[in-house]
Image (spheres, rainbow, N blue to C red):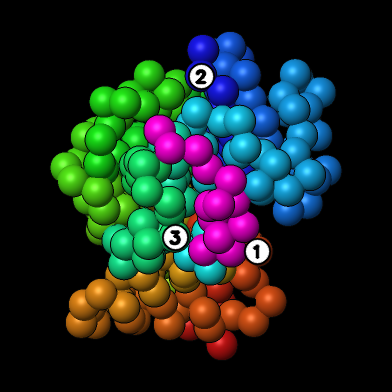
Amino acid sequence: MEKIAFLGTGSMGLPMARRLLEAGFPLTVWNRTPARAEPLVSGGATAAASPADAVRDADVVVTMLSDPAAVRDVVGAFASALRPGVTLVEASTIGPEALRELRGLLPEGVALVDAPVMGSADRAASGELMVLAGGDVAKVRHVLDVFGSVIPCGPEGSGAALKVVLISAVIAGVTVVGEAMALADGYGIPEEQVKQALSRLPLAGLAGRAFGQGSTFALRLAAKDVALATASADLPVAEAVHGWLTSFPGAGDEDLGRIVHHIREERRA
């Protein structure tokens, strides 16, 4: 089996890398904070001291990092160590513009597949993510299948673009539920009654996410994702959503669902 290097073992990267390990792939891992990769090392993965060391013998490299700046830094640190014929699978949410910049960092002969994912850490652990893949997907399809359902999106960058579209819609939906709950508070409608009614609407999934059902998705990362959308087009609703997401100092590491609480408290003040 191909040797895989996985860089970025945070809340999503850890269960994704574990899936590869359980599937039998020889796995080398690197994380900026080494302790976060320790559960994988205990399970049989090899820890690398640097990004370059991680990718040196790899056939497939997967990056799952927090934002475009982190991806640029890490890929810039290992690009010269990549061998011709290697495929870089970029699974972070960075948008198509940053992906084009990334292409410019890679040596000739290195393939690039953008494969951001939709889903929670729980779904990553069970292999039930939606993988939005752009580029020459066939070459690494057997690797991506380990993560969940693969949706070939088209040429390089198309997966990165669709991820921005989908995640901005989800985040906006959760924020709208927050405003709806604030409106219900003003009308004096009991919270449980609103929840039950929402559960019968097409908004049921978003309502469940808004009320804390699912794994943590930090507000700061949600704000970053919406900012990718607003940087690409004039999107007044997304701008308003970004305003809500960044309105509560010190709340950046809280789950996205907490935006409902913050909006309600703001309206009560």
Q: Which residues are magenta?
A: 72-85
Label 2: how many residues lie within 10 Å, few (<14), some (14-19) or many (20+)? few
Q: Earlier in the sequence, mark 3 or mark 2?
A: 2
Marks 2 and 1, how far apart at CA: 36 Å
SS at mark 3 in the image = helix
Q: Earlier in the sequence, mark 2 or mark 1?
A: 2
Instruction: Give the residue at mark 2.
Output: 2
Q: Residue 38, position in %: x, y?
A: 80, 34
Asked if the stretch drawn in magenta spans residue 80, the answer is: yes
Asked if the stretch drawn in magenta spans residue 231, the answer is: no
In the image, is residue 55 above or below residue 95? Answer: above
Q: Are marks 1 and 3 in contact (CB under 8 Å)?
A: no
Q: Amino acid at mark 2?
A: Glu
Quarter placement of the C terminus = bottom right
* Residue shown at 25% from the left, 75% from the top: 232
* Residue shown at 55% from the left, 52% from the top: 80
Q: Could you tell whether 61 is left or right of 193 in the image?
A: right
Instruction: Give the residue at mark 1.
Output: 253
Instruction: Give the residue at mark 3.
Output: 105
* Residue shown at 36% from the left, 42% from the top: 109
Label 3: how many residues lie within 10 Å, few (<14), some (14-19) or many (20+)? some
Pick whichever, 69 or 119, lies toward us: 69
Q: Are marks 2 and 1 in contact (CB under 8 Å)?
A: no
Q: Residue 188, position in %: x, y?
A: 42, 70
Label 1: how many residues lie within 10 Å, few (<14), some (14-19) or many (20+)? few
Q: Amino acid at mark 3?
A: Leu
